[in-house]
Structures are given as structure tokens and as C-alpha cells.
Amino acid sequence: KEQVKDLNDNQTHILEAVKYLNERLEGFEEKINEDKIKDLKDIIDSQVMIDEIIVKNTDDTNLIKKKKEENAASIKSLEEKIYTFDREILTMTTNLQDLIEKLKVEVAEKDA
């Protein structure tokens, strides 16, 4: 009878120890899960920030491309105007040279 009583007492202590260890294990699991959830939330928040930066960079890149195209069109327009001015200057220079030659001829005829 005493052995049975000792066995029961030992089983009770063992069961209490198992119950205590089980409670601690559940506490650790909750903490680990909370930490994992916090880590996942941090990762998701970081990804949201990265996505926002990517979208902003994409918008900025598109804006830069648009400005580049506008600048290219402006440069082409300016080059065309410069070409036109060069042609006008060349024409005026030629006309002035012709006029100078005519005046030289007239002066030479008057002197003769």
C-alpha cells in the first residue's frame, strides 16, 4: 500500500512538473509567435516603404524621360532657328559683298 501511495505521490509531482513545463512551453510559444508576428509586421512595413520608393522612383523616371523628350524637341527647334539665322547671315553677307563691289565699281567710274 505504501508503494502505491509513493507511486501516486510521485505521479502527482511528475504531473505537476509536466503541467508547469507545458505552461512555460506555451508561454514561450506565445512569445515566439508574438515576435514572429512583430517581425512579419516590420517586414511588411518595410516592404510598403520600399514599394512607395519604387513607385516614386518610377514616377520620377517617367518625369525625367518626359523632360528629356521636351528638351530634345526644344534643342531641335533651336538648331533649326540657328540654321535659319546662319543662312540669313550668309545671304546678308553675300548681298553686302555684292553691294561693296558695285560701290567700288561706281567709285572707280567716277574717278576715271
Image (cartoon, rainbow, N blue to C red):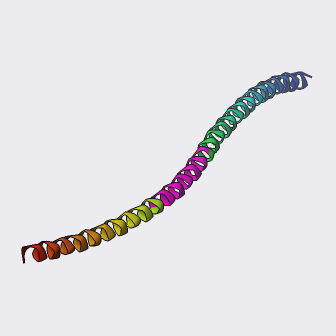
Residue under the image location 36 percent in, 66 percent down:
88
Q: Residue at x 77, y 24 (%)?
A: 20
Of residues 87 and 56, the one nearer the viewer is 87
Q: State the residue at coordinates (28%, 73%).
A: 94
Looking at the picture, how far across and down is residue 93, in whole percent? 27, 68
Residue 86 lies left or right of residue 50; in this view the side is: left
Please state which of residues 59 and 68 is positioned toward the viewer in this rendering: 68
Q: 75 or 90: which is nearer to us?
A: 90
The answer to if 72 sits in the magenta stretch is yes
Magenta span: 56-75
Left or right of 2 in this view: 34: left
- Which quadrant would the C terminus be assigned to in this image? bottom left
Q: Position of residue 28 (x, y in %)?
A: 71, 30
- Answer with left or right where residue 40 lies relative to residue 1: left
Q: Is residue 63 above or below residue 91?
A: above
Q: Position of residue 53 (x, y in %)?
A: 59, 43
State the quadrant of the N terminus: top right
Q: Nearer the viewer, residue 106 or 74?
A: 106
> Magenta: predominant secondary structure element?
helix
Q: Is 46 included in the stretch rendered in magenta?
A: no
**Which residue in the rendered view is the most extreme toward the right?**
1
Q: Residue 99 location, x and y as percent? A: 24, 70
In the rendered image of this protein, does residue 96 appear above or below residue 18?
below
